[in-house]
Amino acid sequence: MGKIKIISPGFLTTVQDKGRYGYQQFGVPASGVMDNFAHRIANILVENHELEAVLEVTMLGPQIEFHSVEIISITGGDLSPRINGKEVSMCRSIKVNKGDVLSFAGMKSGCRSYIAFSGGIEVPVIMESKSTYMKGRFGGYEGRNLKVGDLLNIAQSETVFKERIVPDKYIPKYNNELDVRVVLGPQTEYFTDKGIETFLSNEYKVTNECDRMGFRLDGAEIEHVDGADIISDGIGFGAIQIPGHGKPIIMMADRQTTGGYTKIGNVISADLYKIAQAKPGDKIKFKGISVEEAQDILKEEEEKISSIKKECLSKEIISSKKYFLKINGKSYNVKVEEVK
């Protein structure tokens, strides 16, 4: 069994997996990763089960010391990862040695990175999940975000290191202006036609009140027919509540299980990663689509992940060489890889 030590935890670093599904009827939030796509890709790169627990890193990355040789990958938002101070590429498998230190130099795009470890993170499984639910103080590592000096166990892996890379065409680009597709409902009758038109035709800005529970947006007020309150019902990942003030709230991974505000729509599963990688000030425009269209998009998304799995596992690098070049007075470090 391997170990990693947290030298610095960054802004918010937690253990998360697919989430704790099947317990919402008992009032237990699902939790889990915010960016499902980046999570699955990170695990594919280190040959884990796609839903194995990873570290979810938010905005300001941690410093992690390795007490054993490990195979890792880093996906999602680009927070400028470094090994021993040297920049490393994202979306590929990386071999690290005992004593190496992983750090992050700063946010370039997106805001959440995912670190997978071959073999997975060894924390207790609670209600079929390793995910951290911080408000409930259970799951993950002692039910909390990581702190200075924490030692996490990494399960022993029989995987032999082979450098695996996600082709560029599959890597998402995280923008500051997001086009997000939604399925309207389930309480559209609580909104006037003008209110629904306002929702779909205006741009909304992500406020500072955005976290793992939900994103509050600012923008044009959405008009109700007769108030915002309903008898509480279940809340899914991506549900868009419209309280009495008329401004949307997008419910995320640590959302409560039920709520009493009207919901005008739900972000489709394939677009949730865009919200997960959004930051305060980013702008969102919603587009309504049908349930059938959302299902087709989800199917395409699953086919894309299958293609990534097939292509990145087949593109094994069998040799690589580094060169130092000078062209027109400028210096370049060039790495040439032979791909099988």
Image (cartoon, rainbow, N blue to C red):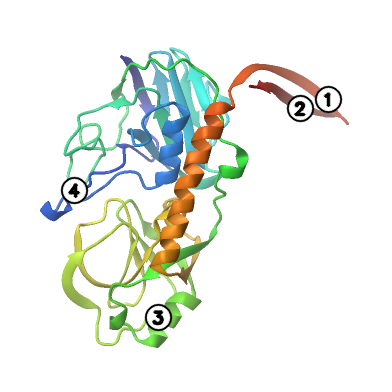
Please state which amino acid type lies under the numbered disc 1: Lys
**Which residue is disc 1 drawn over?**
326
**For residue 80, side relative to residue 222 (left or right):** right
* Position of residue 57 measured from the top left corner of the image (x, y, whole percent): 40, 39
Distance in Å between CA atoms under marks 2 and 1: 6 Å
Mark 4 or mark 2: which is in front?
4
Which mark is first along the chain, 1 or 2?
A: 1
Which mark is first along the chain, 2 or 3?
A: 3
Distance in Å between CA atoms under marks 3 and 2: 53 Å
Question: Which label was assigned to residue 196?
Answer: 3
**Which residue is disc 2 drawn over?**
332
Which mark is first along the chain, 1 or 3?
A: 3
Q: The N terminus is located in which quarter?
A: top left
- Helix, strand or loop at label 2? It is strand
Please state which amino acid type lies under the numbered disc 4: Gly
Question: Which label was assigned to residue 132?
Answer: none
Other-residue count near label 4 (Cα within 10 Å), few / some / many at <14 / 14–19 / ≥20? few
